[in-house]
Image (cartoon, rainbow, N blue to C red):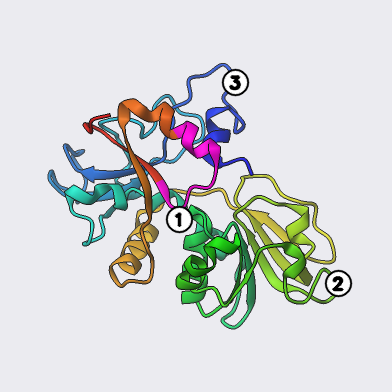
Amino acid sequence: MRLGPVLHREGAFGGAGKRLGLGWDVAGTVDATGVATAWGVGDEVVALDHGMVKPLGTHAEYVVVDAGAVAVAPRATAAAHAAHAATLPLNGLTAAQALDLLDLAPGASLLVTGAAGAVGGYAVQLAAHRGLAVTALARAGDAELVRSLGARHLVTDLAEVPGGAVSGGGVDAVLDAAVLGEPALAWVRDGGAYAGVVPQSGPDPVRGIRVAAVEVAADGARLAELVRLVDEGVLTLRVAETYALDDAAKAHARLAAGGVRGRLVLVPGAGS
């Protein structure tokens, strides 16, 4: 699987010949504000700095974002734990907005691929919270993790998905966080739904299946809802490892190596 940050760095989302600012998530303390905003200096916040092709990203000590993209940081993540808060905006909003595309009623069955990953983990928790019956596609070693997130079933191979790839069988929908494409689509029942996580990309629709891909959007109000779910214990913030900002290249190399459970977070001002 090619991961979003790796693809972004390599220019897969456009920007040939342009400077690409890396990083979308930000968590920290408000240092200054515009003249017409409810936010104040010293507020602990999280935000999504949206945009594929931009001159600067959140791999920085200071980030400027629109006031409408900002939410109060989770109560459990004070300034000393801003690294945990930084794991929420991009992946939490991606999972939530992908579930919105699927538009499933409580009780529907959902397959989440890459369920132990950053987007997949949030997707499992949000789907379970909505009353969906979640089947998690993950490694056998991640069984305890995905079940703790709310998955009812674990499969380690698509061949194990309940119902099988047959006409009228399989799950009601798939949220394809692992970007498997057509193989995952094969396990959706006729007339079901598929949501991918790479914008304007996905398998060709078949058997009446709705196929869509989320293009994550900055949304401070929606982010605030996710923060509330963190504070209520519905969503779990997972930091796999932290790196100093100067060690961003090492973090990207670790991400590209695969097998990361949780997020890698860059911390400005931290030592190497």
Height in image: 10 above or below 112? above
Tell me if 149 is positioned left or right of 108 in this view.
Answer: left
Q: Distance between the residues labelled 2 and 3?
A: 42 Å
- Outermost bottom residue: 107
Which residue is drawn at the image coordinates 58% and 27% (left, top)? Answer: 11
As rendered, which of 257 and 212 lies closer to the eye?
A: 257
> Does any portion of residue 187 appear in the rendered image?
yes
Q: Which amino acid does label 3 sit on?
A: Ala
Height in image: 254 above or below 154? above
Q: Distance between the residues labelled 3 and 1?
A: 27 Å
Label 2 or label 3, whichever lies nearer to me, is 2
Mark 3 lies on residue: 16
> Does any portion of residue 138 appear in the rendered image?
no
Q: What stretch is highlighted in magenta?
A: 252-263
Q: What element carries label 1?
A: helix
Q: Are marks 1 and 2 in contact (CB under 8 Å)?
A: no
Which residue is drawn at the image coordinates 23% and 30% (left, top)? Answer: 271
> Where is residue 38 shown, x and y percent of the image?
19, 51
> Where is residue 57 shown, x and y percent of the image?
39, 32
> Where is residue 135 shown, x and y percent of the image?
62, 71
Label 1 or label 2, whichever lies nearer to me, is 2
Which residue is drawn at the image coordinates 16% and 37% (left, top)? Answer: 31
